[in-house]
Amino acid sequence: MFLINLQGKESIYEQIKSQIEKFIVGGILKPNDKLPSVRALAEDLGINPNTVMKAYQELEKNGYIYTVNKKGVFVSKDLDLKKSHNKQDALNMLNVLKDEGFTKQDLLKVLDEVYEEESC
């Protein structure tokens, strides 16, 4: 599920955080989906659990996930990206679509359709 570049310029916790954000924004992870435990994800990736914990803490602080004691970590059910005015959320969503093969022209056509529907 996660692709971590141990020699990359971006820190490991940032890579985990940004990938989870992209999965949520792109709809791969849905509200109330359970994420791997800190320990399980750290073992899978062969990294220190504190690194995963730091990524999860930032995601929780930003409202992407929530923790239920003794139950686990889940995707936030209150995250409403359609109403979000956060530029980073929009950029993440566009990057996911770009990675999925959407061209700039495809996205512009969709934007035109959306704004045409609003003006009707």
Image: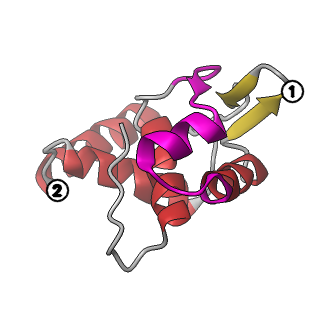
3D distance between C-alphas at marks 1 and 2: 43 Å
| Residue at 36%, 67% in the rendered image | 6
| Residue at 63%, 51% in the rendered image | 49
- CA neighbours of label 1 inside 10 A, class few (<14), some (14 to 19), many (20+): few
Q: Quadrant of the C terminus?
A: top left
Q: Quadrant of residue 68?
A: top right
Secondary structure beneath label 1: loop
Of the pair 9 and 37, the residue shown nearer to us? 37
| Residue at 22%, 51% in the rendered image | 98
Q: Amino acid at mark 2?
A: Lys
Question: Percent from the top left, x then y, of residue 52?
Answer: 61, 52
Residue at the extreme right: 69
Q: Which of the colour schemes (rainbow, by chain, secondary structure, one colour) is used?
A: secondary structure
Question: Percent from the top left, x then y, of residue 45?
Answer: 43, 47
Of the pair 53 and 114, the residue shown nearer to us? 53
Of the pair 119 and 90, the residue shown nearer to us? 90
Q: Amino acid at mark 1?
A: Asn
Of the pair 46 and 101, the residue shown nearer to us? 46
Horizontal relation, residue 83 to residue 7: left or right:
right
Horizontal relation, residue 31 to residue 113: left or right:
right
Question: CB under 8 Å between callouts 1 and 2?
Answer: no
**Residue bearing mark 1:** 69
User: Where does the magenta region start and end?
Assistant: 30-51
| Residue at 72%, 53% in the rendered image | 62
Q: Which mark is residue 104?
A: 2
Secondary structure beneath label 2: helix
Q: Sequence order check: which comes first, mark 1 or mark 2?
A: 1
